[in-house]
Amino acid sequence: MHGLPADFKADFLCGRTLEMVCFTKYQVYLHFSNECLISVEGEISLDRSERMRLPVALSNLYPLIDQKIKSTSSTIAGTLALVFDEGQTLLIYDSSEQFESYAITEHGAVIVRV
């Protein structure tokens, strides 16, 4: 578990639309508008349901496509919360002690790696 920097603010994600969800066996890629990507290798949950390890049932993420992020929050422990237009909350966890759990990239530059 790496956690997030104490001064990390995820509000730069607000207003971005989830345009595409791609996956491999052990990763999920969330492609947002304005060249932003979140690559997830750890655990996620939707609407605070049970945590899903990868590979996840991507059908759970499908309803988020074409929705904008309305608000965000994060914890020093590394949990990132994305609240979408229709009220769903996607939680991305820093769930591995040995490996990175997720990374946020904007315009090709890594913003944070957890």
Image (cartoon, rainbow, N blue to C red):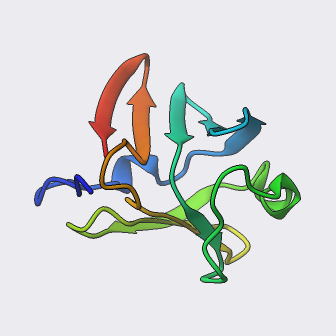
Of 17 and 101, the residue lying toward us: 101
Residue positioned 65% across, 66% down in the render: 52
The x, y position of residue 73, in whole percent, is 36, 69
- Return the residue found at the far front: 98
Left or right: 99 in relation to 42: left
Of 21 and 3, the residue lying toward us: 3
Residue positioned 30% across, 33% down in the render: 111
Total marks in image: 0
- Return the residue found at the far right: 59
Q: Which picture quadrant has residue 72?
A: bottom left
Q: Which picture quadrant has residue 56?
A: bottom right
The x, y position of residue 96, in whole percent, is 38, 55
- Quadrant (top left/top right/bottom left/bottom right) for the N terminus: bottom left
Q: Is residue 89 above or below residue 68?
A: below
The x, y position of residue 23, in whole percent, is 74, 36
Left or right: 24 in relation to 42: right
Left or right: 69 in relation to 55: left
Q: Which picture quadrant has residue 100?
A: top left
- Return the residue found at the far left: 6
Of 22 and 24, the residue lying toward us: 24
